[in-house]
Image (cartoon, grey):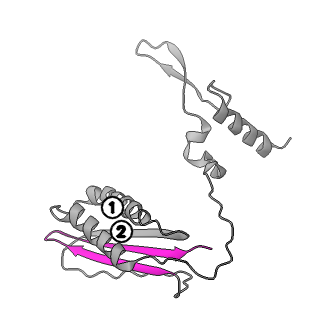
Amino acid sequence: MSELHLLKSQRREKRTSKVPSEGSHLLRSKDTTGRGKDSISTVSYLDELAHHDDNARMVTTMENTFQMGPHKRIPIPAVTDILKDVLTNYLQEEKYEVEWSQKMTKTICEVIRARVKELMIPRYKIVVLVHIGQLTGQSMQVSSRCLWDASNDTVASYSFKNSSLFGLATVYAVYFE
């Protein structure tokens, strides 16, 4: 049996059993008196950064409908209203801070993505990009490239400014058949 096959079978066993396995780390630590103390870590190799199994994600498969385009398109005015509402609510009273903006960018992306998905438009992949920056008289250019079907794919964007910061949110809706 190859080493790769053996590792995959051990990972499968770890997911199904609750007992610590060979993959668990055995740590030896010393207490303040200098005596050795054995402990078993609950961290497995699956929890480490480089050992995640890429196939663990649930994959949704859709059957081909053999239709040439969507039955219903993404309503751009509704998406623009969502962007305006979310950016205004989250950024209106805020002052720019680096750590805060990094966390807020992720939060705003998730909120926008969830609200756009609530529109229930089937067979579109939603990509949300949010940029938050400090207003100090600078300029910024944002560009993107992708394979684009102009008849089915759409994009909506909205920018927001207050006295301290700017926010730019873009939603790409790419038809998936």
Residue 122 horizontal side relative to residue 79, left or right:
right
- Residue drawn at x 38%, y 79% is 76
Residue extent of the magenta highlight: 153-177
In front: 77, or 45?
77
Q: Can you see residue 79? A: yes
Q: Quadrant of residue 149?
A: bottom right
- Residue drawn at x 31%, y 69% is 82
Quadrant of image for the N terminus: top right
State which tag comes first along the sequence, 1 or 2: 1
- Which disc number belongs to residue 68? none
Q: Is residue 72 within the magenta segment?
A: no
Q: Residue 65 in the image: x percent, y percent?
A: 67, 73
Label 2 environment density (alpha carbons within 10 Å; few <14, some 14–19, many ≥20): many
Quadrant of image for the C terminus: bottom right
Residue 159 horizontal side relative to residue 151, left or right:
left
Residue 84 horizontal side relative to residue 40, left or right:
left
In front: 18, or 153?
153
Three-letter code for the amino acid on which mark 1 is drawn: Ile
Residue picked out by circle 1: 108
Q: Secondary structure at mark 2?
A: strand
For the stretch drawn in magenta, the main secondary structure is strand
Q: Residue 122 in the image: x percent, y percent?
A: 53, 68
